[in-house]
Amino acid sequence: MIEILGIYKNFKKIEVLKNINFNVNNSEIVGLLGENGAGKSTLLRIISTMISPTAGTVHVNEYDLLENSKEVRKNIGVLFGNEVGLYEKLTARENLEYFAKLNSMSDTETKNRINELVEQFKFEDYADKLVGTFSRGMKQKIAIARSVIHNPKVVLFDEPDSGLDFKSAKIVFDFIEFCKENNKSVIFSSHSMENIKLFSDRIVVINKGEVVKIFNVKEYQEKYSNKEINNMLFNLV
């Protein structure tokens, strides 16, 4: 579970996030929607302990971001769409083995987990090829697998469908739904409003650093047409 409690973030005199408050339950997918510069990536970087908030805090499975950042990091898997973070002179499997070691996983645990991820992300045919030979979309899938090698309870994906074709994007979102089915908390952002609507349980709309609306997707789909929901979202962002 993620609890975001009164988060503010300033860069010098610029207020980037303003009093952000919402929870993400276990077995829930929350989509972040907003224009470029709205503050989505900054919020995810704060939750992942990459940067500190100016005020407020975050609880990840009851661990406080400010008081126990090490335990927070153990519980989180994170990927930013434009930062694949892979070693191109290693194979896909070797990359995963390396990051498993960084997470203090045993050899047996590593082998079993890599086999699971290779099957889930469908890269059996190139698991033992050098990452430097891969397309942008192939690297993205390996990077997502790398981010969850330690089987975290919380998953943060910033534009996980970036650079992916339709089939590869489906594999990624199937995995996000798999995370939900396995009692994980997921936050993701995407430039695709359709993907946000299709795969989120709730949508958090951020405009100029503030949460302006939180949608329960199922409730709105029962009341409004797809076109009406699109118009609401467009007007908010």
Image (cartoon, grey):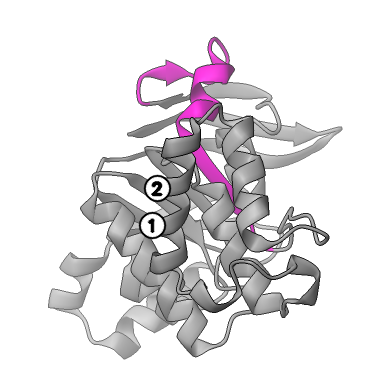
Q: Quadrant of residue 141?
A: bottom right
Q: Quadrant of the N terminus?
A: top left
Residue 75 rendering spot, x and y as whole percentages = 45, 31
Q: Nearer the viewer, mark 1 or mark 2?
A: 2
3D distance between C-alphas at marks 1 and 2: 6 Å
Residue 81 rendering spot, x and y as whole percentages = 66, 62
| Residue picked out by circle 2 | 112
Q: Are marks 1 and 2 in contact (CB under 8 Å)?
A: yes
Is 152 rendered above or below residue 141?
Answer: above
Residue farthest left in this picture:
222
Is 120 on the left-hand or right-hand side of 33? Answer: left
| Residue picked out by circle 1 | 116
Residue 37 rendering spot, x and y as whole percentages = 71, 59
* Amino acid type of the residue tagged 1 in the rendering: Glu
Helix, strand or loop at mark 1:
helix
Residue 18 rendering spot, x and y as whole percentages = 59, 38
Magenta stretch bounds: 61-81
Q: Quadrant of residue 99?
A: top right
Q: Nearer the viewer, residue 31 or 183?
A: 183
Is 114 on the left-hand or right-hand side of 62? Answer: right
Q: Nearer the viewer, residue 142 or 212?
A: 142
Helix, strand or loop at mark 2:
helix
* Category of crowding for the residue at label 2, using alpha-carbon neighbours closer than 10 angstroms: few (below 14), some (14–19), many (at least 20): few
Write the residue at 15% across / 76% down.
223
* Amino acid type of the residue tagged 2 in the rendering: Asn
Please say whether residue 56 is visible from this viewpoint: yes
* Category of crowding for the residue at label 1, using alpha-carbon neighbours closer than 10 angstroms: few (below 14), some (14–19), many (at least 20): some
Magenta highlight on residue 133 = no
Magenta highlight on residue 62 = yes
